């Protein structure tokens, strides 16, 4: 499986956990990296998701910059030429998702100059990097999780998330799909009466409803490729993001026989 890894640049001041590592990260570029199949949706990023209880690592790349993601993903990257030595990665520090909640980021193509790192409880540890970029206009999971944070002050408080990290951020219309309008995730969320990010079955149905439609019938309504079909611009945007070093290609190995039968 091929993913586009979106490099979301950490903006100073860095979270405490990253300020006090053995080697100073002050003059280093640090990125939270999110695996996506939808590079054409990056205009609509409103935040980044991490799981508060999951373990992440910060490790060094061969160009001296730092990536933050799950150790499983770092290991995969080390076999794909990301690090100085094949199969090896130098861990700068280990951290929990909660250590980077609230961190300020600068994400490529996003109409928001600054977005925040927020908690999502449905992140799967064994997929992608464990860091997910959020596009609530086109991803029902993202819209559900953002709505949860907006509706429940107690949920924000629990994770020390302040109002300004959440309340100003609305889904941004970026892709028009016949019958679903220009905020397809919001349309299906309402249609299926989804209540929260824990509504697993409905969210699965919601995703299936929009995925193929977006690919075959979606039209970009913003940016440089405005007016073009999603299926025609997906690769072009991926290329543009990798050319500008704002993204890299990352491969996820096939699931092992063990996990397939288990
Ligand atoms: C931006 C985006 C915009 C995404 C969208 C989806 C949608 P798949 O097809 O099952 O492989 N994702 C990535 N890693 C994780 C994880 N560890 N846990 C939970 N979710 C994760 O799913 C790939 C998508 O799942 C990725 O693409 C990412 O969200 C999320 F408009 O990135 B996506 C209808 C979906 N729309």
Image (cartoon, helix red, strand yellow):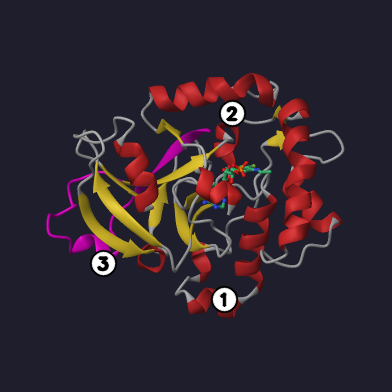
Q: CA distance from mark 1 to mark 3?
A: 22 Å
Whichever of callouts 2 and 1 sits on the residue coming sooner in the sequence is 1
Residue occupying image coordinates x 40% and y 64%:
97
- Judging by the rendered image, the residue that carries numbered circle 2 is 223
Residue 184 visible in the shown view: yes
Q: CA distance from mark 2 to mark 1?
A: 34 Å
Tell me whether circle 3 and circle 2 mark residues in contact (CB < 8 Å).
Answer: no
Q: Is mark 1 within 8 Å of ligand 1?
A: no
- Judging by the rendered image, the residue that carries numbered circle 1 is 155
Q: Which quadrant is home to the C terminus?
A: bottom right
Q: In the rendering, at what x and y percent does residue 128 appear?
A: 48, 45
Residue 134 visible in the shown view: no
Which label is found at residue 192?
Answer: none
Viewer-proximal residue, 228 or 79? 79
| Residue 242 drawn above or below residue 29 | above
Which label is found at residue 16?
Answer: 3
| Residue 46 drawn above or below residue 100 | above
Is residue 22 magenta-colored? Answer: yes
Q: Quadrant of ligand 1?
A: top right
Whichever of callouts 3 and 2 sits on the residue coming sooner in the sequence is 3
Whichever of callouts 1 and 3 sits on the residue coming sooner in the sequence is 3
Viewer-proximal residue, 97 or 72? 72
| Residue 126 drawn above or below residue 214 | below
Viewer-proximal residue, 62 or 150? 62
Q: What residue range appears in magenta?
A: 1-30
Q: In the rendering, at what x and y percent does residue 233 appear?
A: 61, 22
Q: Report the side of 214 relative to 169 (left or right).
A: right
């Amino acid at each position: 499986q091929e993913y586009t890894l979106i490099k979301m640049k950490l903006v100073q001041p860095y979270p405490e956990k990253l300020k006090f590592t053995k080697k100073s990260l002050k003059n280093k570029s640090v990125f939270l990296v999110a695996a996506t199949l939808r590079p054409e949706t990056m205009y609509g990023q409103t935040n980044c998701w991490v799981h508060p209880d999951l373990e992440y690592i910060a490790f060094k790349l061969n160009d001296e910059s730092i990536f933050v993601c799950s150790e499983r993903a770092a290991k995969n990257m080390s076999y794909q030429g990301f690090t100085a030595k094949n199969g090896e990665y130098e861990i700068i520090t280990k951290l929990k998702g909660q250590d980077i909640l609230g961190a300020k980021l600068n994400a490529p193509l996003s109409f928001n100059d600054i977005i925040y790192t927020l908690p999502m409880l449905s992140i799967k540890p064994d997929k992608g990097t464990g860091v997910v970029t959020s596009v609530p206009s086109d991803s029902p999971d993202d819209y559900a999780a953002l709505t949860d944070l907006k509706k429940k002050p107690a949920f924000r408080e629990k994770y020390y998330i302040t109002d300004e990290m959440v309340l100003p951020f609305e889904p941004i219309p970026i892709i028009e799909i016949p019958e679903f309008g220009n905020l397809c995730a919001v349309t299906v969320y309402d249609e299926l009466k989804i209540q929260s990010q824990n509504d697993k079955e409905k969210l699965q149905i919601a995703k299936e409803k929009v995925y193929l439609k977006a690919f075959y019938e979606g039209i970009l309504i913003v940016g440089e490729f405005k007016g073009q079909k999603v299926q025609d611009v997906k690769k072009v945007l991926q290329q543009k993001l990798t050319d500008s070093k704002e993204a890299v290609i990352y491969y996820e190995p096939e699931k092992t026989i063990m996990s397939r039968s288990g």
